[in-house]
Amino acid sequence: MAVGFIDCHCHVTADEFLQDTKDILERSRKEGVRALVSVTEHCGEFERLLRLSQSYPDFVMPCFGVHPIQNNGDGPRSVTMKDLEPALVWFEKCQKDLIAIGEIGLDFTPWLTPTAKERDEQLKVLKLQLDFAKRLDLPVNVHSRSAGRQTIAFLKEQGIEKALLHNFAGRSSAALEGVKAGYYFSFPPAVTKNNQREKLIRQIPMENICLETDSPALGPNREERNVPWNIHIPCEYIARVKGLSPEAVCEATAQNALRLFHKMNYKLNK
């Protein structure tokens, strides 16, 4: 049975959506989006996301996580353990509400993470969040900029079995290691602007692909706010690359999402 589009990685609590969140969510539904897997970057977003998920229990699927790059108003910087400490209390308190832990991961962009000390701190922050996900049998929603191979290797080393590598831009060889581990990969609307991703999508089996928007970022036009109903753009792009119909890709990616985010099945049918 057709489910509709499932956006496996977006940011409904982003500042760009503060003024019209209700309109964004209602239009997304009308445009055929069945569910939004909404991630966070810091604990300042947790309470608002929890409220939204309670107001839209069969639509907004909450993930709590601390991103490897933080921005406290002084510009972006690498995450520290101090950023994670208050989040762990929320993880414990809201564990029954969460469908995944995310957005977590590694970001080894040289000008953001220039030293080994910062990279080591990112690994510590990631490990603690992975430990929590394993304890609760939750999948992880993962960022891996300039660290695709390292991220996948670390996930495997830590015994992670359920992971989504969002907006993956690493080498095909690294992605195929992730496929062997049973991981999923999702691609946002901006994928249509990057020829390198075509080769990557061609090599990743359809059974390991999901859809995302990463809205409000990574839309079809950099200067415009991305929105969840742009999910049809990566769907149509993947369909062209794979030689399938958009309807087949929509159905396959939705079923993949339901397998990965197993608690979503209960929320959708509640």
Image (cartoon, grey):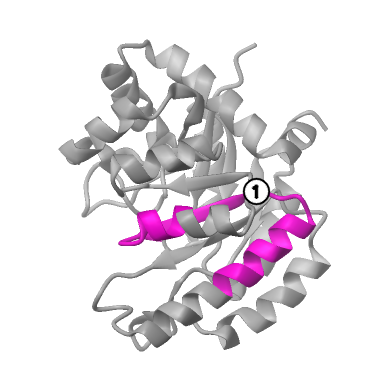
Vertically, is 14 above or below 70?
above
Give me the residue at 61% from left, 74% from top.
43
Front residue of 238 and 221: 238
Give me the residue at 78% from left, 59% from top.
135
Within the magenta stretch, is there residue 168?
Answer: no
Q: With 95 as the anchor, is 234 left or right in this view? A: left
Name the spot of residue 241 as percent of width and height, x first: 27, 21
Q: With 186 as the anchor, is 242 left or right in this view? A: left
Name the spot of residue 60 as percent of width and height, x first: 64, 45
Give me the residue at 59% from left, 65% from top.
65
Residue found at the very far front of the displayed protein: 157
Give me the residue at 34% from left, 70% from top.
108
Counting other residues with Cα less than 10 Å from the Cα at mark 1, is it few (<14), some (14-19), or many (20 or more)?
Answer: many
Q: With 134 as the anchor, is 27 left or right in this view? A: left
Q: Is residue 48 visible?
A: no
Q: Say which quadrant the N terminus sits in.
A: top right
- Quadrant of res 106: bottom left
Name the spot of residue 227 as percent of width and height, x first: 40, 44
Q: Is residue 153 visible?
A: yes
Within the magenta stretch, is there residue 126?
Answer: yes
Q: Say which quadrant the C terminus sits in.
A: top right
Secondary element at image label 1:
loop
Q: Which residue is mark 1?
A: 139
- Quadrant of res 236: top left
Vertically, is 190 above or below 134?
above
The amino acid type found where label 1 is placed reads Pro
Q: Which residues are magenta?
A: 125-152
Name the spot of residue 263 as percent of width and height, x first: 75, 40
